[in-house]
Image (cartoon, rainbow, N blue to C red):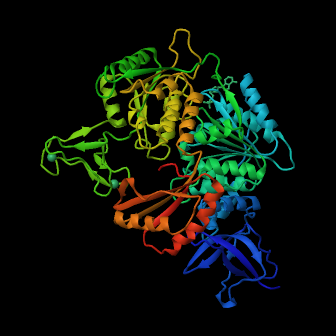
């Protein structure tokens, strides 16, 4: 038989497919679209995915190279998965191979199949719990029941916003709906994908899902897994063995041949947006995937993103509402504002908040102090000469990390020992300015020496498994006062926590970023939602939230206190509509970086002029707010259009033109950018 030509997607920046020859050996199985192959590429051997098989190539025979190996032991990736990758590549303007290959586990792309074969053996053992002990499902309240019936009863593509206050039992709705879907027999065993924003929420959820679905294989997929485990779990999903897949954003690109429902928990969460490489929105891809497959997709949140809210308001998404907390007698915590101009307190803690903490300690209840700034102090300074701890490589200040005895730049990871004296004038009395979680911890410990205090942030949980251990000790009641960044704000169902103190939300109130207030509202509502989740004791405190601010009159706080998400979101949407901002307009952002700002700006200026496009608004190139990071100067160019297809059509022409410019400037395009 004639040799065949395989068209292969490779992980390269070249926007093309590559032809390779496959020589038929007697008795060998024929290659199939969707199989993983190894091929020579330049002087290397790389992995690729077969996307088409042809009789002939446009390349002359002597230019064609042979395929080295085909990973026959793995069933081919399906056409639907390839289409998903094609869509993502097309929409986010990247080569197909740059989307498809990095989404696969490393061991599947490895040059030897040793790890793969061992994973295949172990995968066979990924099994449900041995002794299934069924747990009783709680009786749903009527709002939950309506939600489950509606989602499970939906046919075809059904995008559904599940708008439920914190603690309203959204998880219960996901689980009981999943039970309906899995029980259905459509010939193949159905699969359900549940996306969650944070790795540190998977173990908790995974445990309750396993318990709830004895006899069902459940796997998780996230970047915290060791390669071997990721490979096994991915294979279990790919072969259809795993029926429930829990994962962070990267799981949206996993292969799920019998996918019948997708859940996006906390759909508003910024971590669904990948911020480097392929800058995709896992939420948007999940909705596309549900559309492609004609299945329901549930977007759950107490504070939906404005994009999703707009779809719900316009009727494109169906909206289901859970107004009450699910646990009997659990109520939403009361929100109080503490005017920091009047109540100064000390060490970043007002006397009102300190008194509330003391009361919780006396009652044996837990408290949470939320401050979205890690480190000891955001800057170290010299009063004598005005020196401050600027990063030498970035337009940013180096953060003081006291326990680690370091100054650290959070943008380029430069680290220095804390100077003993001012580098400019020799003054030995250097002062920390401002407060981060470490400094708050130090102060609270001094003020409440008897309290058991735990800080949870990216620094305290660097070691693998340490975040889980920390959360376990909170759940286990070994902590009186928890201090943390956004890491502690989401999802967790702390049963004995009755007070949330929010230390310094003010900087976000007046940010130049138009999304800042949407984010702040969501973040505060989430963290507030950690309080008072259990039933109120008759003699106990209901949950309480205290916000320390210099702007107690700010309307955002009024809306928050009234739990008026609807009013807040509708007002924001109206502002956005009047100002022609997303979701009423579509955007793409061209970023450029170079040694000198001028070079980056010149490139952007040329880019702005290289195509004539009447429907597209091309703004002026501007330096980014943080101009320099790791000695690169950065600038950006925003383009906008009222029509998404028109913007896409423009990008299709524009990117090839940009490549033609052959500039040495490093540039990238982001579609639907969130940080502008
Ligand atoms: P959300 O995700 O909406 O914030 P959760 O799903 O964490 O809320 O649920 C909050 C609490 O309510 C959990 O402890 C859960 O077990 C409990 N719960 C959920 N539904 C019910 C129900 N129908 N009856 C009693 N308790 C429930
Ligand atoms: Zn000095
Ligand atoms: Zn830096």
Q: On screen, 35 above or below 164? A: below
From this viewpoint, is residue 446 visible?
yes
Closer-to-camera residue (367/94): 94
Closer-to-camera residue (84/469): 84
Quarter occupied by the N terminus: bottom right
Closer-to-camera residue (270/657): 657
Q: On screen, 72 above or below 373? A: below
Closer-to-camera residue (159/397): 159
Residue 576, image x and y in percent? Answer: 54, 40
In the rendered structure, the answer to whether residue 513 lies left or right of residue 226 reads left
From this viewpoint, is residue 12 visible?
no
Report which quarter residue 320 is drawn in: top right
Give the residue at x 63% y 54%.
644
Residue 510, image x and y in percent? Answer: 40, 37
Give the residue at x 29% y 48%.
407
In the rendered structure, the answer to whether residue 587 lies left or right of residue 513 reads right
Name the outermost residue toward the bottom.
62
Give the residue at x 50% y 38%.
519
Residue 603, image x and y in percent? Answer: 43, 67
């Amino acid at each position: 038989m004639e040799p065949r030509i395989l068209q292969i997607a490779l992980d390269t920046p070249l926007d093309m497919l590559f032809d390779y020859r496959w020589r038929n050996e007697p008795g060998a199985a024929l290659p199939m679209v969707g199989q993983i192959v190894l091929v020579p590429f330049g002087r290397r051997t790389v992995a690729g995915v077969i996307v088409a098989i042809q009789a002939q190539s446009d390349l002359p025979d002597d230019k064609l190279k042979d395929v080295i190996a085909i990973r026959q032991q793995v069933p081919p990736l399906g056409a639907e998965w390839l289409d998903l990758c094609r869509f993502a590549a097309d929409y986010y303007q990247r080569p197909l191979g740059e989307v498809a290959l990095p989404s696969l586990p490393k061991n599947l792309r490895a040059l030897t199949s040793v790890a793969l074969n061992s994973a295949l053996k172990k995968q066979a053992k990924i099994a449900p719990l041995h002794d299934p002990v069924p747990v009783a499902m709680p009786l749903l309240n009527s709002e939950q029941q309506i939600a489950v019936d509606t989602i499970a009863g939906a046919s075809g593509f059904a995008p559904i916003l599940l708008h439920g206050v914190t603690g309203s039992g959204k998880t219960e709705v996901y689980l009981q709906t999943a039970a309906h879907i899995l029980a259905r027999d459509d010939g193949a065993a159905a699969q359900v994908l549940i996306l969650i924003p944070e790795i540190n929420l998977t173990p908790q959820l995974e445990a309750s899902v396993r318990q709830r679905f004895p006899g069902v294989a459940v796997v998780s997929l996230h970047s915290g897994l060791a390669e071997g485990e990721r490979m096994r779990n991915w294979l279990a999903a790919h072969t259809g063995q795993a029926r429930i897949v829990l994962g962070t954003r990267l799981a949206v690109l996993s292969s799920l041949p019998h996918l019948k429902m997708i859940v996006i928990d906390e759909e508003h969460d910024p971590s669904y947006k990948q911020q480097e490489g392929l800058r995709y929105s896992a939420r948007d891809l999940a909705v596309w995937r549900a559309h492609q497959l004609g299945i329901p997709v549930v977007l759950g949140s107490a504070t939906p993103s404005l994009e999703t809210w707009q779809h719900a308001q316009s009727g494109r998404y169906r909206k289901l509402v859970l107004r009450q907390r699910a646990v009997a007698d659990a109520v939403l915590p009361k929100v109080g504002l503490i005017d920091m101009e009047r109540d100064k307190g000390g060490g970043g803690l007002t006397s009102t908040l300190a008194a509330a903490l003391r009361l919780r300690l006396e009652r044996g209840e837990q408290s949470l102090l939320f401050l979205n700034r890690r480190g000891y102090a955001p800057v170290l300074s010299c009063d004598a000469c005005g020196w401050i701890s600027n990063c030498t490589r970035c337009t940013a200040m180096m953060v003081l990390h006291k326990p680690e005895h370091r100054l650290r730049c959070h943008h380029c990871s430069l680290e220095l020992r804390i100077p003993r004296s001012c580098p400019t004038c020799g003054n030995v009395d250097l002062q920390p300015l401002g407060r981060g979680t470490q400094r708050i911890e130090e102060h609270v410990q001094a003020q409440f020496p008897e309290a058991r205090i735990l800080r949870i942030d990216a620094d305290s949980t660097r070691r693998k498994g340490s975040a889980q251990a920390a959360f376990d000790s909170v759940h286990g009641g070994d902590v009186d006062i928890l201090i943390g960044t956004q890491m502690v704000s989401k999802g967790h169902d702390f049963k004995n926590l009755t007070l949330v103190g929010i230390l310094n939300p003010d900087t976000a109130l007046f940010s130049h970023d138009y999304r800042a207030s949407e984010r702040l509202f969501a973040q505060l509502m989430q963290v507030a939602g950690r309080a008072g989740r259990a039933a109120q004791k008759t003699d106990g405190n209901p949950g309480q939230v205290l916000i320390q601010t210099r702007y107690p009159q700010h309307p955002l706080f009024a809306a928050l206190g009234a739990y008026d998400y609807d009013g807040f979101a509708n007002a924001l949407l109206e502002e956005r509509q009047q100002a022609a901002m997303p979701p009423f307009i579509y955007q793409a952002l061209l970023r450029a970086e170079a040694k000198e700002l001028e070079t980056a700006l010149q490139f952007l200026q040329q880019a702005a002029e290289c195509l004539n496009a009447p429907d597209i608004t091309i703004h002026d190139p501007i330096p980014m707010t943080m101009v320099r990071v790791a000695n690169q100067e950065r600038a950006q160019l925003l383009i906008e259009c009222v029509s998404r297809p028109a913007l896409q059509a423009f990008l299709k022409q524009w990117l090839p033109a940009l490549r033609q410019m052959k500039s040495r400037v490093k540039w990238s395009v982001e579609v639907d950018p969130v940080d502008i």
